[in-house]
Every structure is written in structure tokens, then in C-alpha cells.
Image (tube, rainbow, N blue to C red):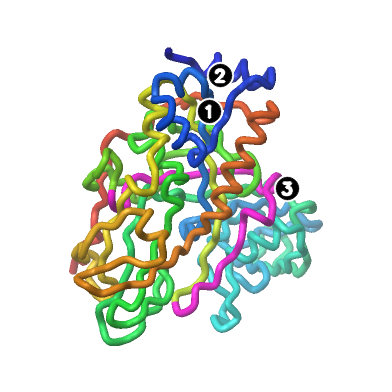
Amino acid sequence: MAKTYEEINEKISHGKAVVYTAEEVIDLVRDKGAEKAAEEVDVVTTGTFGAMCSSGAFLNFGHSDPPIRMTSIFLNDVQAYGGLAAVDTYIGATQMTENSEKGYGGAHVIEDLVAGKKIHLKAWGSGTDCYVRKSIDTHISLDTINEAYLYDPRNAYQNYSVATNTSERTLHTYMGKLLPRMKNATYSSAGQLSPLLNDPHLDTIGIGTHIFLGGGDGYVAWQGTQFNTASSERNGVPVAGSRTLALIGDMKKMTHDFVRGLDIHGYGISLAVGVGIPIPVLNADIIKRTAVSDDELFANMVDYSVTSSKRPVLKQYSYAELRSGIIEYEGQRIRTSSLSSYRKARSVAANLKDWIEKGEFLLSKPVSNLPEKGIVKPLEIRE
């Protein structure tokens, strides 16, 4: 039985929508089959919470008296971009303070803003006839500034490689600490809860899709950077980094629980963001794909001691194996750990489910589909 967005939203508005999380729906589909489950369920919620380095925020400070055209901007000693209009800026999550040992960066500024803390603003400008002030030193907060919205060029990666290290020395990477001689392996995905693993070909996710972002409302703005559809698949789902999303949302509606600055030892700063995407059950095929479980989802393990961007694949593992804490490779037992939080991913999906059941969150039909094909070009070094 096919459904429409309008029919599902009508049920949501009247508090009659049946909502399952992507974890809960697995047993339902196994017990009743996809056809009956599709008749019963209206929405499946997904969730993920992990490091998303390609994140940042646009801020508008408002004009001082006399006004200033800011060209050099620092927030809590973290440099923000000064090449926009007079009092607009973009602060990137991975930008660090000049004192790298402080372990503080743009992600922490964003976290502190969302948490309601005061931020030290220092800015300079050359001075013009219409912007006579040349410097300013003050404090701001999310309440005192005008617009503040998270804009993340690449979030919610559709799968990612498992990282290990065959070398004789410890490596410090964005995938965490990798011990020598393959003594550990790390991964970063919510697996069966992960948004883009539940809609692998983006049949329901597109530009304008209404989402949970950082504890508040957000939308899919565009395809994410490094959008890739060329990855090989297993069980109809990519086994390596594939599609991504560019996301936007109002920081003033976000919560500290789902926006956290990270200091990854030996690598740098990143931002952990909670992302949840509702998947409308328009037909049986859609709910069948959302019922994918960790033992059906696989990721490639690669050697991060290889400095080339083309690291060879050592082996594939299911997320059930990875989440067990131990995997085996050529007779060697390897400890595994996740850089993303499955507990927080559950919380994202559960919160989104609660909003929909209460009629507080409606679905939006994409205004445009995301690309069917996308490749990632390398940066060639040209003399």
C-alpha cells in the first residue's frame, strides 16, 4: 500500500502517526514482513552522533556605534573568517587557537555559544568613511547576536573505512589513536541507525528534507562535499565512504547535548554533531531498506600507515563484528572501538521519534533530488 507525504503529515498532525526507530523496525519487519510492516508504520527515525570535521557556523554580530567593518575577527582567540560583510563571519569547526596546546578551537566556540556561554569578540578593520571604527573588544552570546546558524558542508557520511595500523609506531589520526602492529582498529558509524545506511540511494532524502540537527530543527541544503556514488556495495549498501549531506540549522534552537567540541589528540579539533533523519514509509521497499541490521552492513578495513590516499583494503567486517569489540585478521585478534556514540545515536533517533509522535515535527518532501552520480576528484599537483 503506497502512502504520500501529505497522508503521513496528516496523521502526524492528529497524533496518529506510527513511528519506529531504525533499530526497533528491524524485528518488526522480520516478524511481519515488509508489506505488513509498511502498512503499520508511517515513519522510521535514524540517528548518528560523531565527529564531523566539515562543520561551522555563520554569525551576524550586529552593528556597533560607531560601526566597524570587521576584516580580522577572533572569538575566544579562535580566528573566524573576515571576508564577508561588515559584521558577518563564518567560523570553521577545525580552526584552532594560536596556542595549539590549549586544545580549543572553532568547534568549542560553537559548543559554548549553544551552551549559552559568553564569547570574547576581538575584531579589527582598516576604517572607512562609512565604518569609522577600527577595533572592537567585547563579549557576545547567542542571545545578543542576530542570526546564528550551523552550516556544515559535509556531514552524515554514508559509511566510512575501519582504520588500523600495520607499522611499528603509534599513529595519531582523525580516526583516533592507532596502536602499532594492528593492536587495535577504530570505526565511526552508527551502523543500523545511521541515516544514509537506511536510505542508501537517497530515495527519500534530498534538498529541503526536514531533519534533527544538533538538538533542533535543520534541513538538507545540498549534497555534501566529496559526494561519491562510485563506492562498491554489499547488500545494496556502500562499504566505504560514499554519499554526504550539506546541512543547515538554527543554532538558537540547538542543545548542548548534541553539539560538542572535540580535541582529538595528535590530530586537532573537530565537532561532534547529532543528526537524525526521518524516513517516510511510502512503500514496502523503503521499510525493507530501513530494516537493515548491523550483521548486514559492512565496512572496509584499511591500513592508515600507508601515506597514500589510495590505501589498500585489508578485509571487510560487519558492524555486528566491529561492535562486538574483537575482530580477527589472519589469525590475529584485534580490539575495536567506535569514534561515534551509539548511545547518543539512539537518543537522536528517540528524540526525533518523540517529536513526530507529539505532532511537533512534520516531514518535508524534497524540493529536488540529490545527484544520482558523483565522483571525488583528487587534487593534482601541477607545476
Point out the frontmost of discs 3 and 2.
2
- Cβ atoms under marks 1 and 2 closer than 8 Å: yes
Between 75 and 179, the one nearer to me in the picture: 179
Q: Earlier in the sequence, mark 3 or mark 2?
A: 2
Separation (CA) of disc 3 from disc 1: 35 Å
Q: Position of residue 236 (x, y in %)?
A: 27, 38
Separation (CA) of disc 3 from disc 2: 35 Å
Q: Position of residue 341 (x, y in %)?
A: 52, 58
- Look at label 2 and name its amino acid: Ile
Question: Which residue position holds label 3?
Answer: 146
Q: Quadrant of the C terminus?
A: bottom left
Q: Position of residue 244 (x, y in %)?
A: 39, 46
Question: Which residue position holds label 2?
Answer: 8
Residue 305 magenta-highlighted: no
Magenta region: 239-266
Q: Residue at x 73, y 69 (%)?
A: 120
Separation (CA) of disc 1 from disc 2: 8 Å
Tell me the crowding category of disc 3: few under 14, some 14 to 19, or many 20 or more residues within 10 angstroms, Cα based: some
Tell me the crowding category of disc 2: few under 14, some 14 to 19, or many 20 or more residues within 10 angstroms, Cα based: many
- Cβ atoms under marks 3 and 1 closer than 8 Å: no
Question: Which residue position holds label 1?
Answer: 43
Q: Position of residue 327 (x, y in %)?
A: 32, 66
